[in-house]
Every structure is written in C-alpha cells, then in structure tokens.
Image: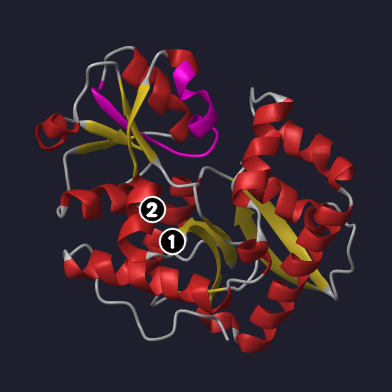
Amino acid sequence: MRSISLAYSPCPNDTFIFYALSNGYIDLEGLGFRIELHDVEHLNQACLDGQFDVSKISIAALGRLSGQYRLLRAGNALGRGCGPLIVGQPGASLSELSHAEITVPGTMTTANLLLSLYAKRPLQTVSMTFDRIIPAVQRGQYPFGVIIHEGRFTYQEYGLVQLLDLGQWWEENTGLPIPLGGIVIRRDLGQALAKKVDNLISKSLSYAWAHPEATRGYVRQHAQEMSHNVIMNHIHLYVNTYSLDLGQEGEAAIHTLLSMGAEIGLFPAPPRSLMAY
C-alpha cells in the first residue's frame, strides 16, 4: 500500500467532501492516507515547505506554490454568492479602509488577495484564524474584518454590519465564480497518482451527496460550535458542481484571480496551466 499525506480544513465543506475517503466508505485502490486537519492558513504555510503530498489551500496561495504543487479537479471551493465579506461596527465606512488595520484570515488567503485587489494594493492587515475575527471586531480591537466560512451567517449576531461583499465585487467585475479554495498535489508525484487521487475525491463527494445523513457526525465533530442549520448552509453554499469538477469556467476563474494578483505585484504571473493533468 502506498501512503499519501492528505491535509484539509475542519470546515464543513471539507469534512463533508472527504468523509467517505477518510472513513473507509470507498475503495482506496491501494492507497493509504495519513490525514491531518488544520486551518487553511496553516495549510498554506505548510505547503511552502512541501509538508503535505495532497492538501487544501487557498487559491491565492497557489500564486506562490505553483512551482511545487498542481491543482486537482475535484474537492475545490468555488461558487457564486459565497465570497468573503468586509464587516465592521455600525457607522464604519469603507473610506477609512486604507488608513486602518484590517484583520484577515491569513496573509495567503483568497480573502486577503481580494481585499488587495479591491484596494488595488496591499493594505495594513493583521492575520488571525477566521473564528477570532468577528469577536475581535466586536470588541473594537480592529475597525474592520474580512470574514469567511460560517461568519457569513453569524456576523449580525455580534452587532456587526456588512460594508462590502468581496465576492459580489469580484463577480460584477469578472463575471466569473469566486475561486476560494483548492486541492493541490505535489508536482513530483506525477500525473498517474494525481488522476487516482482526483478520482477518489470525486467518489468521496459522490458518496456524501448520496448519503448526507451518514456524514453528519464526522462533520459535526470538527465544526466547533456551529448549529446544524449553519453547518447545512455552509455545505450547501460551498459544495457544488465545481467541487466535483472545476470545468473550464472554474479554471478560467482561478487563472484570472492569480493573474490579477500578479498585476499588482503580489506574486509571479501564473503558468499557463495550473492543473495536475
């Protein structure tokens, strides 16, 4: 049995997708997986050192990782109406954005890249795990926060207001779905293994769609304090047809995002093909 290190986040979209693969409900075709779950910014940073064979990353991080990793077609997080939000306390104004400290869910995240693209330059940011951002803005520790994941559904409970939907801004300017996260594999593992892993992720997602109730315990185990409704909203928003296969539109969205980041000097221009095969 060939052993592969696999890392993804504890967010419901990832645990839903990888449930069957991680718990032995599909044939792994002679592969064994050493699985770790971490916050996506932890995974972004770990992949800089090639720590994992296969990993979830922010699509923005691929701008710095494309020399070491290539993108798989399954397991990715793209969509419409699901982008990061800039939030603040009532009375906050986007006109103050360029002069303020903004808390973001990681320097290599797509959320941070979209913030820079909106401002046309990098802003003054402070990185923290996504679950700490809303409380930090509520306390007045930072005037603005860029929130992701279930924060889209809960920020109003903390008395915060939405100042800008970065995903909507992206869609209006590009006409493309917002590319948030992707599954990558180390380039040196070769195309044959990449195809096999991609196929297993597709089978794992298909199993989850066919047996959603079976995934509930595993998803809930890693979902911190989320309510069932928030978990289900999260999965429905971030797991879609792009998660089964990026398709041409998904590839175009990713290439456009990375090209725009390169244009403002955040990382080198992306290679013509970012795909593992």
Mark 2 is on which residue type?
A: Thr
Disc count in the image?
Answer: 2
Residue 257 visible in the picture: yes
Label drawn at residue 59: 1
- Disc 1/disc 2 C-alpha distance (Å): 6 Å
User: Could you tell whether 265 is left or right of 109 in the image?
Assistant: left
Residue 12 visible in the picture: no
Q: Position of residue 83 (x, y in %)?
A: 44, 47
Mark 1 is on which residue type?
A: Ile
Write down the quadrant of residue 92 in the picture: top left
Of residues 236 and 101, the one nearer the viewer is 236
Residue found farthest to the left:
99
Of residues 236 and 268, the one nearer the viewer is 236
- Labels 1 and 2: the sequence-earlier one: 1
Range drawn in magenta: 142-156
Label drawn at residue 17: none
